[in-house]
Structures are given as C-alpha cells and as structure tokens.
Image: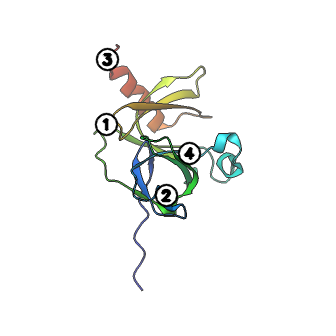
Amino acid sequence: MPEPAPVPRLFIGSRVTYHGTVPEMHGRTLYLLPCTWFGRCRACWEQDEDFGERQPMERDHFVAVDLTTDDRLHHARRSHLTPIPHEWPEDAVPFNIDGYWYAAAYTTFGGSDGARTVHFYTAEDFLGRTWCHFREPAPDVHRLDEQARRRPVI
C-alpha cells in the first residue's frame, strides 16, 4: 500500500482555498490566520506539556478570511484547506508559535528576555507580527534577533 503524501505545512499569512462543509466559501482565495475564535476556542488554548515550548504540536484548525468581503471561517480544519503555492523570501525562517507555523522575518524584543514580537512574511506583501514568550530562547530565536540587527532602521 503506498504511503500517503505528506501534509503540506500551512503558514500563517498564506493564501489557501477551502473545500469543506461551507459551500459558500468554496472557490475563494482566503488568507490564513491562527484560530482563536475570539478567545473562546478551547482547542486553540490547549497546552500539552509533553510537547514543551520548542516542540509544539501542529494545530489542526485555523481562521480563513476572504479579504475582499471580510467573510471568515472560524475553526477551519487543515484537511479542508489547500495552500496556494507561494515563494517566501530567502531569509524566511520557518518558526512555530503555539503550534502555528510562520515564515518569520525577524524579532524585536517584547519587554523581557524571553518575550519577542515575531515579524513574519505574508503572501499579501506586508509583514505581520505576533507576540510570544520563551522560557529559554533557542538558536532559531537568536537567528531572528540577529536578522533584526541587520535590517535598516526606518
């Protein structure tokens, strides 16, 4: 029996199409965000200590937004989303925050040694940002810190 194809990694800020149970969202280009369901999605806030901060599980649910109408699918399942291929910049660092992957550009300090604002690339040609905290910043965090030092100050 052939092995199933690997599931493509979904990056926050990507464009996707949807083929799930809400037919009115089919055929649209959607923008991918983390699912937080206005803070009420228990699955979004679940923490599994077995994974730890450096090896978090990949989330299986997202928010998908039609940027032309602002229609949203909350808690869209990974299996109902197909990524639209996109070429990320060469310096993009695949970076996982709470189970969601980002094409990170650089970090800025967020108020303490372990806190960072992660600036990430999007398929919509703007930089997004999100805040996170680490018990101990790892090499990929230090790499993103260094990339910030090389960026011109505007």
Please name the residue that numbered disc 3 is placed on.
Answer: 152
Q: Compared to 5, does 10 lie above or below?
A: above
Q: Secondary structure at mark 4?
A: loop
Residue at 35% across / 41% down in the picture?
123
Is disc 4 surrounded by few (<14), some (14 to 19) or many (20+) residues within 10 Å? some
Q: Is residue 113 left or right of residue 151?
A: right
User: CA separation, marks 4 and 2?
Assistant: 38 Å
Image quadrant where one finds the C terminus: top left
Please name the residue that numbered disc 2 is placed on.
Answer: 24
Q: Secondary structure at mark 3?
A: loop
Q: How is the image coloured?
A: rainbow
- Mark nearer the viewer, 1 or 4: 1
Q: Position of residue 101 (x, y in %)?
A: 48, 46
Image quadrant where one finds the N terminus: bottom left
**Which label sits on residue 50?**
none
Q: Tell which circle, 3 or 4, labels the residue nearer the N-terminal end.
A: 4
Q: Position of residue 130 (x, y in %)?
A: 52, 32
Q: Which picture quadrant has residue 37?
A: top right
- Mark nearer the viewer, 4 or 2: 2
User: Between residues 81 and 143, which one lies in front from this camera angle?
Assistant: 81
